[in-house]
Image (spheres, rainbow, N blue to C red):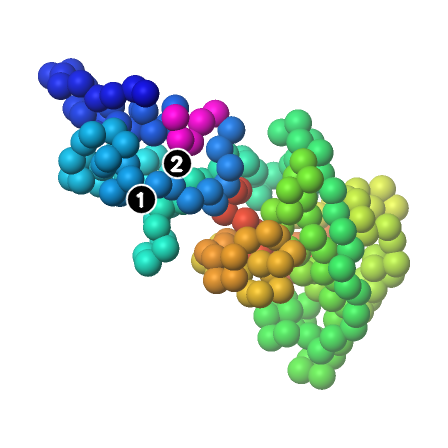
């Protein structure tokens, strides 16, 4: 088993970081795997508790480990780089990375328009919109729970094959080029339903992305709310 050695060049805690990266985290880390406790690391590598804490702090800083108060430290899987502003949608974004995209259609129904959608579509409090919910996966791993809202004039879009690229349908059949007019990101916490869909724990921090999309003439096309796994690393 590798061990730390006194060195003027590399502090012991940095040596421990490298050992943990190699022995425990590895090249293909399992996302959300529980790390050994501080006491277990202290005993396993014959180092002080202070050294263990400094090493864990470095791993958190590097994004390799996350700490949840009262639960311990967890390994963070490899991040998936995805530019939310490239205008090509999830399917094209996956293919740009060499990943295989897949989509499961969960629900289509007509609902009363939420406040934000009423303002964006310019409709009234009693007006309806079409709501589409889908689960998006990259290389078979669920990563986005997506809710799309369409104004009723765009309701025919919901009759298309929605287990593929929505943007390809818009471009190829309806000659609509979608542009993201605005994008907002905030932290959310997985509901029991979202957690079950995405294979995470209820209450786990997620990223909520809210898009407002217009066509080439500036006319509203849809809004999208995406609950996104923390395995994604976003570029705007």
In this rendered view, identify the residue nearer to me: 118 or 66: 66
User: Which stretch is magenta?
Assistant: 23-27
Would you say residue 15 sits in the magenta stretch? no
Is label 2 or label 1 in front? 1
**Secondary structure under badge 2?**
loop
Task: Label the magenta part by its dominant secondary structure.
Answer: helix
Q: Is residue 205 above or below residue 59?
A: below
> Which residue has dot 1 on it?
37
Q: Is residue 129 left or right of residue 232?
A: right
Q: Residues within 10 Å of mark 2 (few under 14, many from 20)?
A: some
Residue shown at 42%/44% (left/top)? 34
Vertical side of 224 occupied by 116: above or below: below
Whether residue 90 can be seen here? no
Q: Residue furthest left?
A: 8
Please give left or right for residue 171 compared with residue 28 in the image: right
Q: Front-most of 81 and 152?
A: 81
Task: Please determine whether, in this image, residue 34 is positioned above or below residue 192.
Answer: above
Splitting the image into 4 quarters, where does residue 98 fall? Answer: top right
Please provide percent x and percent y for residue 162.
81, 51
Q: Rounded to the nearest whole Å, what is the CA distance between mark 2 and mark 1?
A: 16 Å
Which residue is at the front of the view, 142 or 114? 142
Q: Is residue 112 visible?
A: yes
Disc 1, SS: loop
- Where residue 172 sits: x, y (%)? 85, 42
Q: Position of residue 22 (x, y in %)?
A: 39, 24
- Quadrant showing the N terminus: top left
The residue under the point 34% across, 29% down is: 20
Can you tell which mark lies on residue 223? none
Judging by the rendered image, the residue that carries numbered circle 2 is 64
């Amino acid at each position: 088993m590798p061990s730390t050695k006194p060195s003027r060049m590399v502090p012991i805690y940095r040596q421990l970081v490298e050992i943990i990266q190699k022995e425990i985290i590895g090249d293909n880390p399992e996302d959300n795997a529980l790390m050994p406790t501080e006491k277990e690391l202290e005993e396993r590598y014959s180092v002080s508790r202070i050294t263990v804490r400094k090493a864990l702090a470095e791993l958190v800083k590097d994004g390799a480990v996350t700490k949840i108060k009262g639960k311990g430290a967890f390994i963070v899987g490899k991040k998936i780089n995805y530019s939310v502003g490239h205008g090509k949608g999830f399917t094209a974004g996956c293919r740009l990375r060499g990943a295989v995209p897949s989509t499961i259609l969960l629900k289509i129904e007509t609902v009363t328009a939420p406040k934000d959608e009423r303002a964006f579509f310019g409709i009234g409090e009693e007006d309806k919109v079409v709501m589409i919910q889908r689960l998006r996966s990259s290389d078979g791993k669920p990563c986005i729970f997506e809710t799309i809202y369409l104004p009723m004039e765009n309701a025919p879009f919901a009759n298309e094959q929605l287990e593929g690229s929505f943007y390809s349908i818009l471009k190829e059949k309806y000659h609509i080029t979608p542009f993201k007019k605005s994008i907002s990101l905030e932290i959310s916490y997985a509901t029991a339903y979202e957690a079950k869909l995405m294979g995470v724990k209820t209450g786990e921090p997620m990223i909520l992305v809210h898009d407002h999309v217009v066509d080439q003439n500036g006319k509203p096309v849809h809004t999208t709310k995406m609950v996104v796994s923390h395995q994604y690393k976003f570029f705007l």
